[in-house]
Amino acid sequence: MRWERRKVLFHDPVNLTGDSERDALACALQAIEAREGERRGWDQPPRLWTLHLADIDTGAVELRVVPPREWAGTARNPADSLSSWALSFPEPGPVAPLRFADSGDGFAGVAFMTEGYTAPDDAPEDPEEMARRAAGERTFLTRPDRVEVRMITAVDINGHSYMLRRLRGRQPEIVATGDHEGAAGDSRGRVPHALSRIAHAGRTGFFANH
């Protein structure tokens, strides 16, 4: 069975990392959020895609929708379901840099879009709340000043991670993190770590027939 495919056009790469392929992927994520997120509106379910970017000069990325039946379990938090599914893949180890164009089927990485709540940017830090959140409690849900947020977290085949965030009513912001040369994976969060496993599996051919 072939997964649903969607082609998303994007504009000139953003100057985010200094690497043309990584900047193209960051730009593609902005286009994905605009089309699959902002255009569709809020209150959308979480989605997981593989990203295919064999030629950055085409100005288009191909999304392949990973069906929820593959990864979405019964956990209330979609990050828990994603993390559980990722455990079925081997822990990624050191990898040699690989250009997207040289990857099988132009496989560039994976992206996970979710919605939730967060604190306003100007809210003061509360050490007690931060400690509760670090322990796994979802504290943002109980804040009277909470704001809706849409996020795309992505990890490419070389272990670099990307985060796009849009607060409701605001323009999106994107950053590239986890810039560990020669390493696949970013341990600074459950979702990036889970995606690093999935991206590494894709790099080694797991998604070749999907």
Image: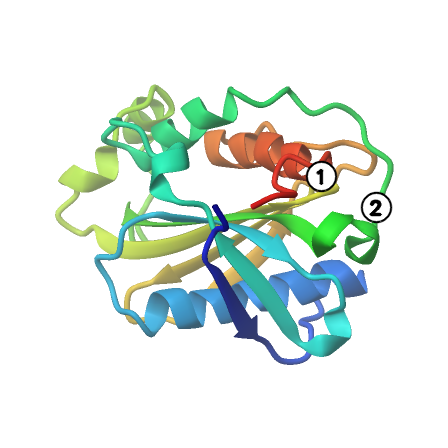
Q: How many labels does the image show?
A: 2
Please tell me which residue lies in front, 160 or 142: 160
Please tell me which residue lies in front, 204 or 137: 204
Q: Where is residue 11 in the image (x, y as percent from the top left)?
A: 62, 80
As drawn, the label of residue 92 is none
Mark 1 or 2, nearer chain start: 2
In the rendered structure, the answer to whether residue 128 lies left or right of residue 180 reads: left
Density class for disc 1 (Cα within 10 Å; few <14, some 14-19, many ≥20) is many
Q: Label 1's element?
A: helix
Q: Residue placed farthest to the right in the image? A: 96
| Quadrant of residue 128 within the rendered picture | top left
Residue 118 visible in image: no
The residue under the point 76% across, 61% down is 21
In the rendered structure, the answer to whether residue 137 lies left or right of residue 98 reads: left
Name the residue type under label 1: Arg
Task: Quickly name the residue at label 2.
Answer: 98
As drawn, the label of residue 203 is 1
In this picture, is 132 found above or below 109?
above
Distance from the alpha carbon under mark 1 to that under mark 2: 9 Å
Q: Where is residue 127 in the image (x, y as percent from the top left)?
A: 34, 29
Are the residues flagged by discs 1 and 2 in contact, CB closer than 8 Å? yes
The residue under the point 61% across, 66% down is 61
Q: Where is residue 43 in the image (x, y as percent from the top left)?
A: 21, 57
In this picture, is 63 found above or below 133?
below
In this picture, is 15 found above or below 82?
below
Tell us which disc is closer to us: 1 or 2.
1
Name the residue type under label 2: Leu
